[in-house]
Amino acid sequence: MVQNQKFKIASLFAGCGGLDLGFKKAGFEIVWANDFDKSVWKTHKKNFPKTHFDTRSIIDIKSREIPNDIHGIIGGPPCQSWSLAGAMRGANDHRGQVFYEYIRILKDKKPLFFLAENVPGLISKTHFPEFIKLLSKFRMIGYDVDWATLNAKDFGVSQERQRVFILGYRKSLGLQIEFPKTTHGILDPLFSKSKKYNLKPYVTLKDLIGDMRKAIPAKERNQPNTNGELLVPNHEYMIGSFSTIFMSRNRKKEWNDVSYTIQAGGRHAPIHPSASKMIKAEKDLWKFDNKTKHPYRRLSIRECARIQSFPDNYIFYYDTIADGYKMVGNAVPVLLAKAIALNIKKQLKKAGAQVKN
C-alpha cells in the first residue's frame, strides 16, 4: 500500500536542487535527478550525495533508465523560451520543446503524480494556446491536472516571485487537486483575510539577511574568492557597472520589505538594503544617491540564496561568479517547494488505502 511507503522522486531539470531540497524536507526521497547544465553538477551532487545524477540532456535519456519504483516526477523545464523578459519563442524554441520530453517520460513511467514549474510567461496571451495543449496532453496520458500561479512571499519566502505550477495525479487515484494555502500575508486589522486565515507576517529582508556580516567583492573580472577568503560560504558579490536596463527602474528594497525577484543573473541582482533609496530622475531612469552612507552593491550570492530560502549549510560550487548567481536565481525557493510537497504528501496518504503502485 502507498500509505506505508516513503515516496520516491525523479527530478528532471534539477538545477542546483531548490525543488529537490523542498521535497526532501517534506519527507520525500530524491532517488534520481538530471540536468544538462554542467555548471550545476557539482552543487547538486555534493548536496545530494545519495541521489543518482544523470548529466545527459533529457532528449538522450530513455525512460527505462529511470527507476521504475518512483512515485513522482518533478521539475522545471527551461523557462527562457516562455519568459516575458526573453524572446518568448515558446514551443518554437528547442528549449520549449523539452516540455514534451518531460511528458514522454511521464507517459512511460506513469508515477502517481507530477509537478512542473515555470515562469508566468507560460500562461501569457502569446503562449496560452500552447499551454492549453500541454494540459490536454497531460490529461491524455492519464492524469487529472490543474495549475496555479503562486507567489513565494505568501509561503514564508522573502521575495516577490510568481511562478506557474502544474500539478497532476494519476486518474486512478480519484484525487481532487489542491494547492497549498497561503501562510503569510499583511497583518493589518483592516485586512480581514489575515485574521481569517491566521496569516503570519511576511518575512522581511531584515529578518533574513540583517544578521549577516560584511560581504566580499568578487575578484578582478568577477572571479570567485577562495574558500579561505570567505568567512561565510558564497558570501561574495558581483562587481562592475550597472547597465542602462538595470537603472531603468528602482532596484532597491528597504529592510522591512520583501526582496525583488532573485533573477538568474548577477548583473540583475537587487541592491543591498543598507544603501540609501534610489532616486527617480525621469521616466525609465533611476539614479544612486551620491550622499549615501553605505555604498550601492549587489546582494551577494549567499544573500540571494537565503532569500531563496536555502540554508547556510547548502554550499554552491562554481567557477565564475555569474554561474553562482545563475544557479541560485534559477532555483525554486525551498520553502515554497516544501509547502507544495507537504500538500502532495497529504493528498497521496489520503488516497493510500485505495491505491497500489
Image (spheres, helix red, strand yellow):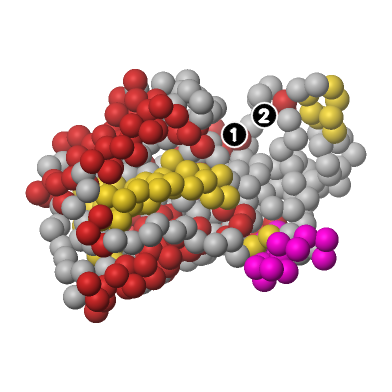
Indicate the position of residue 267 as horizontal and vertical percent values. 59, 34
Indicate the position of residue 114 as horizontal and vertical percent values. 31, 53
Image: magenta residue range: 189-204
Quarter of the image where the C terminus is located: bottom left
| 138, above or below 357, in the image | above
The answer to which of marks 2 and 1 sits earlier in the sequence is 2
| 79, above or below 26, in the image | above
Identify which residue, 157 or 325, lies in the foreground: 157
Contact check, label 2 and label 1, Cβ < 8 Å: yes
Q: Which mark is residue 246?
A: 2
The answer to whether residue 133 is visible is yes
Residue at 47 percent of width and 43 percent of height = 164
Label 1 neighbour load within 10 Å: few <14, some 14-19, many 20+:
some
Residue at 27 percent of width and 37 percent of height = 137
Label 2 is placed on what type of residue?
A: Phe
Indicate the position of residue 305 as horizontal and vertical percent values. 54, 54
Circle 2 SS class: helix
Q: Name the residue that disc number 1 marks.
A: 267
Q: Is residue 197 magenta?
A: yes
Identify which residue, 233 or 80, lies in the foreground: 80
Label 2 neighbour load within 10 Å: few <14, some 14-19, many 20+:
some
Q: Which mark is residue 319?
A: none
**Marks 2 and 1, how far apart at CA:** 8 Å
